[in-house]
Amino acid sequence: MPADEIQFLYCAGEATLPITANGGDAVLIAAPLRERRASIQKMVAAFAEAVRFVEENREKAKASVSKVLRLKDEKALQASYDAYAKRLMNRRVIVRVNAVTEGVEIVRESGTKITKKATYLIDNSFAENLEKSGFLKELWGGKIS
């Protein structure tokens, strides 16, 4: 597993979902996508709320980054915060095709045969549902960039 990749379990009610996060995107295996859509919808909403928290609570977010990355140097901490909070995260919580494409290429280079294109591996319907329902507009006060 690459150093910048984190694997964890997300608990939504009674459902536990295995997730791999790399940068600002999260990847979930296909079976839970089909079987636990309501739980995943809640998880994506929680991701959107986390993005808002990070943007609105810079010092708390930096403290979290400091703890996870074991950073004490303020310049390095600020650069890390800027990378994660400003460049990698997105308010729409849409999985970016280029990020998945890069991940697929890394896996291919390691010798794994992958025949699917990145666009086939992405399901942004959960983020789109948040937008259609007005959740994102309400969360961001109408200012979704």
Image (cartoon, helix red, strand yellow):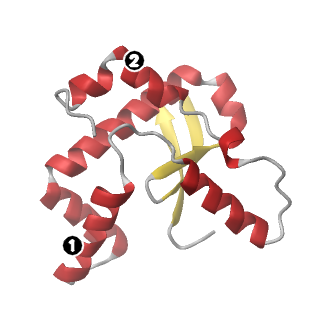
Residue 111 appears in view: yes
Which residue is rendered at x = 38% and y = 40% of the image? 47
Q: For mark 1, what is the residue?
A: 78
Which badge, 1 or 2, is on the more N-terminal residue? Answer: 1
Q: For mark 2, what is the residue?
A: 132
Instruction: Measure the C-alpha gap from mark 1 to mark 2.
Output: 34 Å
List x then y, in percent, for residue 90: 36, 46
Residue 14 appears in view: no
**Type of amino acid under label 2:** Lys
Q: Which mark is residue 65?
A: none
List x then y, in percent, for residue 122: 62, 39
List x then y, in percent, for residue 81: 26, 66
Work out whether residue 48 or residue 108 is closer to the camera in this orientation and state it.
Answer: 108
Question: Which numbered mark, 1 or 2, is in the foreground of this view?
Answer: 2
Q: Is residue 33 left or right of residue 117?
A: left
Q: Is residue 31 left or right of residue 111?
A: left
Label 2 sits on a secondary structure element that is helix
Which residue is rendered at x = 37% and y = 24% of the image? 131
Write down the quadrant of residue 108 in the picture: bottom right
Work out whether residue 96 or residue 8 is closer to the camera in this orientation and state it.
Answer: 96
